[in-house]
Structure formats: structure tokens, C-alpha cells
Image (spheres, rainbow, N blue to C red):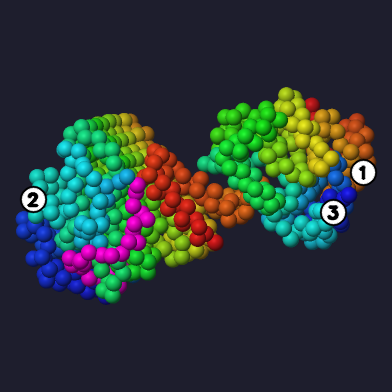
Amino acid sequence: MSRNDKTAPYVESFEEISKTLPGAWLADTRSNAIRQFEAEGFPTPRTEAWKYTNLNRLTRAGFNIAGISGVSGASEWSELVIDGADTIVIVNGSYDASASKKGAVPIGVSIAPLSEAIERKEPSLEGRLTKIAPTHGAPLVALNTAFMREGVVLKLGDDIKLEQPIQVIHFVEASDTRLSVHPRTLLVAGENSSATFIETFVGSAGSVYWTNAVTEIEVGCGASILHVKRQAESLEGFHTALTQAKLDRNARYHSVSLTTGASISRNEVRVSFNGEGAEALMAGGTLLRGRQHADNTTQIEHTVPHTSSNQIFRNVLDGAAHSVFQGGVMVRQDAQKTDSSQSNHNILLSSGAQADTKPELQIFADDVKCAHGATVGDLDETALFYLQSRGIPARRAKALLIEAFIAEISDALSTGAVRDHVVDAVSAWMEDLG
Amino acid sequence: MTLLSVKDLHVSVDGKQILNGINLEIGEGEIHAVMGPNGSGKSTLSYVLSGREGYTVTKGEILFKGENVLEMEPNERAGAGIYLAFQYPVEIPGVSNLTFLKTAVNAVRNARGQEELDAINFLKYAREKGQILEMKDELLKRPVNVGFSGGEKKRNEIFQMAMLEPTLAILDETDSGLDIDALRIVSEGVNKLRSTERSMIVITHYQRLLDHIVPDFVHVLAQGKFVAEGGKELALELEKDGYAKFGIEDGAPQAA
């Protein structure tokens, strides 16, 4: 199949449905984006940024853009709801008002489904929506920009400290047509505000679909955002996502992700620093089995002095699973006193599993600290025997060691319901351990 | 009554023969010292008794309370009452000593048909046993053996032994790397755990430990076989005359 054969169905769909997509004011942006997607095509391993992830299975599968769907009776996502959180539920790419649960939000906070925010042309979208995450060189972002219909816009006013976590659940239900959904999320945190934001991606077991998500985040001066992502898509599903965060002076952005789902997934996080004193942490845990493939790619841009970034990625692979970590750090000439570190450790539970890890550090400033480290290995046989010799059965011993290995990810979360959300997912994965 | 019966045990590691016909009978409440120079097969004996992978029994048998140990997983052996105090205790980052011990104690209690301990009762039990070894509470919260001094690690081994209440404890060079004070605390701990229902195999290179933990029997191991056996006076002979008396070359430095 040529590049055109793969992109053509999406271009055709766009021509058919573009008029039904929200926001006439976005029409040009959308059509520019689809043209860009058409020109660039799907990413292939020929590009360095996609070296280890081949989307052939995804592009061959052929997906239909999800239209507006009715209310779903399915509740497979309900056990992933975080206690005490405000939840926004998006089913097959459409907002499900009846399933969503919003408490009273403080004055200065607005949470709205994307379609409504677009129709109202909310001021917070201006200069942010589709602007924080550029489409150039990112064909999947372009595709999302062309088709984005639903998602969430969360805006925190200055000095707002939001107590309750905000959780967005993206659920795709099994259907005969292979759906692709293109959710778009925008989070704008005003000066000195703080919030915890969780994105949960889940699909009904066995369903084949494609989630292509884009999340844009702006963290204002002195603001603090904890962004948790739980990727628990159907094991037959596909998941590609890009998060782009822009940090102002003294801002703090912590991203914690846990990946257990999807047949092929790509989780790309990009952070750029626009002000001194800002700090970013990216922690990611990936637990895979069977023939699953998961790619975590980061790109941190240190452009101004006195910023810090820390990346912690831990992968556990069973069966013939394949993980990819590409940790990109760019330190521009002006970014003196940058403090950056990254580590990626992988445990292979079977001889058929494979881990690719690639640090990419480009440093143009001369007074910086940049550390990186990566390992790939088996579960420590000596530690396993030590635990067993104390009466602990092999399965439980393995689970203890894996939990400890992955714990560095959840250590980035303080105790409470959000931490449980991640820790429980690790335990659940372990239950099916051979 | 015989607790452990080892008959004509031959063991190889990576195709290399290490043990060449060990015979050992241990009765209830007895303490047996196994002495030998480096490379004589002491650690192999401890690992094959506790079930470590990679140790192939090519001949012979091991019966514990009349049951064939070789068919049991390491955790089943622990449940049955075999405990190995490691020469080099393993560090396990990310797993707290407390979680580890609670999991272990309850696994063993389960195997022995006893009720599991809840969090409160477990803590009470751990404090009680901790006193025997003068364990600081703080060591319980730390990850298993991580950042422990050599002495603290060995003390932790004996503490675990107190917690798991084995009927056969194998102490593999528990004295190595210990200063005089640590040796005293550890061996006093071991002595407090002596009872008529608990037997021990004390593996050591030197006599020093046996001044503190006085054995009923001494076996001298060389090239995978016992070359001399006797009472506690045999250890003193070894101390005086060295292994050379038994025609064994000992490359290891003498104890200070």
C-alpha cells in the first residue's frame, strides 16, 4: 500500500463529515491539518522519532471516524472511577452527560466538554487550542486537529487550588465498525493555581478501535499540575497520544502514567519551559504481556536558565511484549543551570520479550547537569530465591519484586485515591502473572 | 528422633561435581558444626538443603522429618521448617523489611496450618522477637537489607529466623564480616533460639563462632566430603593445628 492508500480514507472521511464537526471558526485550521496529514502520511520507522514503533498493523486495519453516538449503557469503566473525583465520561468520542458526575466547582474554575467550549468559542481557547501542540512534523496531531470533536476544557483561574481531582474517562465500546476517536483536551492553569487531572483510557474487552488523543497543557507562573494518565485500552485496541505541556516561571508539572493496555501504543510527552525556576517530572510505568507493544517517547525543551526535568520510566515485559523508551532532552545555549536526569529500567520476564531504550540528549549550554541511565535485565534470581527461602511462594515473590520495581512511579503520587488508582492497576496486572 | 537425614549426597553445579557423598544425620535439638576451607562445598550444602536452583543432585537423598526434600520448592521447605541464614543477605530495594516479614511469616503460618496474623498482632510479634536481637524499630521500616551494615544484615538474618521459627536452621558463615560486638549479639541471639525442638547446622571456616555457639558435633568438609567427624573438641584441634592436619590445603587467611 502506498502512503496515499493509507491516508486517503481519512481524507475522504474529512470531506464527508467536516461540516458536522464543531466550530465553523476552526474550519480552516481543520482543513489545513488534514492536508498536512495527507502530505506527511502516517509516521514510519524511517523517521528517527518512530524508529522502534511500526504502525503497519494500525494503518492496515482501517478505521472509521466516530460520529456522534447516543448514550451508552456500558459500565465497564465504572471500576476505574476515582473516589471523590469529578468525572467526565466520553463514550465513543461523544460526551455522556448522564454518566458524568460533576460536583460544585469553585468560582474561577470551568470544566466543559470540548464541543461546547468550541461552539461558545470560549476565550480560554484563544491562542491555546491547536496552538500549544503544533501539527508540523506530527501527522497524528494533525489528524486529531482535523477530526477533534470531543474532550475536555479545564480552566483554573489564578490562585485556585482545586481540591477534588478531575478525571476524564475515555471509553470505547465494542462495535462492528472499527472506530477511531480523536479526543482533545485543553488544561489551562492560571498563576499559582493547582490541580490533579487524570485521564483514563479504557475500552470494552476485545474491541478493535483506535484512540488518537492530544492533550494541551499550559501551566502558569507558580502553578502546579499533577497529570495522571492510565492507559487501559482493550488489548486489541490501538492508542496513540501526544501531551504537550508549556511551563511558565516557577511552574511545576508532574506527569505520571501507567500503561497496561492496547495492542500497539505510543505515549509521547513534550514539555517546554518558558520561564525560569520551572520543574517537570515525567514518570511512566509500562506492564505488557502477549504481543503488546508500547512506546514512551519524551521531548523536553530547556530553553531558559534554571529549570529542571526528571524522567523515570520503568517497564516490565512478559511473553513476546516489546517496550520502547526514547528520552529526548534538548538544552539550548541560554538554558544555563539546567538540571536534567532520566532513567529507564526494564525487566524482562521471558526470553521472548524485548526492550529498546534510547536516550537522546542534545546539550548546547556549558553549565548544566544532565544525567541518564538505562538497564535491561531479568528479575533478580538471588532476590527471588531469598524471598522463596523465607516461605514466600514463587508467584508472590515475583509480584513483590515487580511491585517494588514499579513503585518508583507511584512514589511520585502522595497517598490517596489517585495513588490507589495506579497501585491497584499494578496489582491487577500481577494477578494474571504466570 | 532423626530430623534430617542426608545419604550419599552428590551435587553438581554447572556440570562440576561439588559434593561427593555427604552423609549426615541430625537429631532433634542437636547443633552440628560443618567446618571447612573455602571451596570445600559448605555453601553448596546449605543451598541444596534450602532448594536453590542450579544445584543438581546427581545421587543420594535428603529426608526431612521423613519427607523427600528434593521434591519440595524452597518456600515449601521453609514451611516445613528449614531456614537458611545467608552468608551474604540479599538487598531488596523497594520492599520494606516489614512487608517482607509479614508476607513471609503469614506464608509460613499458612503452610503450617496456623492462622495468619493481622497487622496489629504481627507488629506485636515482631517487637517481641526483635528484642532477642536488639533490633531497632527503624530497621523494620527500611527496605530489606538496603543500607544495613554487615552486622545489621546478619542480625536481620537471625531476627527472621526467630520470626519464622524453623525446626532446622542452617547458619551459613554467620560470623563472616562481624566485629566482636556484632558477633556477640548475633550468637547470643542464636543461643536464645536454641531449644530441644530446634536443630542447627552451623557452617563456618573458623572456630571463633563455635566459642559462642557450642556444637554437639563437628564435621570437617573437604573436597565435597566429610573427612573427619567428632565432638566439639575437634573444632579446637582444627584451630590449633589448622586444616593441614587433615591433608587439606587452606588458601584462606587465618582468623585474627
Q: What residue type is labelled 1?
A: Glu
Mark number displayed over residue A381: none
Residue A208 counted in the magenta span: no
Badge 1: residue crowd in 10 Å (few <14, some 14–19, many ≥20): some
Q: In which quarter of the image is residue A225?
A: top left
Helix, strand or loop at disc 3? strand
The answer to whether marks 3 and 1 mark residues whose Cβ atoms lie closer than 8 Å is no
| 3 vs 1, front mark | 3
In front of the other: B60 or A327: B60
- Asked if the residue at tag 2 contacts the one at tag 3, i.e. Cβ–Cβ closer than 8 Å, the answer is no
Element type at marker 2?
loop
Q: Mark 1 lies on which chain?
A: B
Residue on which disc 2 sits = A121
Residue A241 seen in the figure: no
Residue B233 is left or right of residue B207, and the answer is: right
Task: Say which label, 3 or 1, has the lower sequence index.
Answer: 3
Q: Which residue is rendered at x = 46% and y = 55% of the image? A: A428
User: Amino acid under label 2?
Assistant: Lys
Q: Nearer the viewer, residue A62 or A374?
A: A62
Q: Do labels 1 and 2 share a chain?
A: no
Q: Where is residue B162 in the image (x, y as percent from the top left)?
A: 71, 38
Q: Disc 3 designates what residue?
A: B6
Residue B229: mark: 1
